[in-house]
Image (spheres, grey):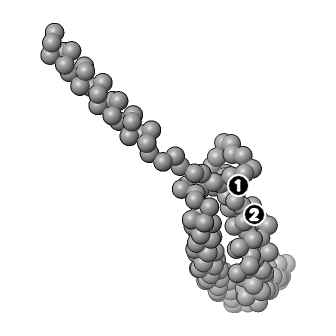
Amino acid sequence: MKKILAIGLAMCAVGMTANTYAADAPKPVIAVVNVQEIFQQSPRISDLNKQLQKQFKPRQDKLIAAQKSLQDEMDAFKKDSATMNQKEKDKLQKKIASDQDSLSKDAGEFQQDLGKEQKRILGGVQTDLNNIIASISKKNGYTLVLDSQAVVFSSDSTDITKDVMKQFDSK
């Protein structure tokens, strides 16, 4: 019975010590930022999107023209194949197949290049946002900043979105 009582007292002492340390620990100072809002409303993001569109517009137009040309060839083949001899049919089918392969290859390269450029731009944007958020956090003593989309509730006083967007857009 004495052993059980001693073990119980020891466990209570450990529990009370742990609670004392937890009570002495500094409370986190939390802020939230709406990253989605920044991506949707930032003039800088809008400018980056416009630059990306401008950069890839000529290739996109070329792909659209090639696709239209291919569709025209396929329509012509469908319309005229009944009156064509076999040699003409084979020649046009071969050209259509070649054009389809070329278009598919070009479209794949376009998507790959566009994806790489988007990833590069997004990486730079994320780095800038993280640096800005870290700077604002240090300045205001925040120990934790969460994306407001992942938070059930926060008061307006903890939202640093406008500050982050202001600094982000000034770069």
Report crowding for label 1: few under 14, some 14 to 19, many 20 or more residues within 10 A (C-alpha).
some
Location of residue 82 with respect to 155 vertically, above or below = below
CA gap, disc 2 and disc 1 = 8 Å
Q: Is residue 132 above or below residue 104?
A: above
Q: Which mark is residue 162?
A: 2
Question: Which residue reaches farthest top?
Answer: 1
Residue 58, position as x, y percentages in the image: 76, 90
Tell me, for residue 43, which label it has, or none: none
Residue 2, given in percent of the width and then of the height, sits at 15, 12
In the foreground, 85 or 94: 94
Give the residue pinned by disc 1. Answer: 159
Residue 167 is left or right of residue 72, and the answer is left
Report helix, strand or loop for mark 1.
loop
Percent of width and height locating residue 48? 73, 80
Residue at (62, 71) in percent of width and height: 132
Q: Residue at 63%, 54% (x, y): give it.
A: 31
Using the rendered image of the protein, determine whether residue 90 is visible from the camera's viewpoint. no
For numbered disc 2, what is the local secondary structure?
Answer: helix
Furthest-right residue in this view: 79
User: Of residues 153 and 11, which is closer to you in this image?
Assistant: 11
Q: Taking 106 as reference, is 71 left or right? A: right
- Total numbered labels: 2
Quarter of the image that includes the N terminus = top left
Asked whether disc 2 touches disc 1, contact meaning CB atoms under 8 Å apart, the reply is yes
Who's the residue at 42% across and 39% down the image? 22
Q: For this view, does 143 lie left or right of residue 97?
A: left
Quarter residue 24 falls in: top left
Quadrant of image for the C terminus? bottom right
- Residue type, mark 1 in image: Asp
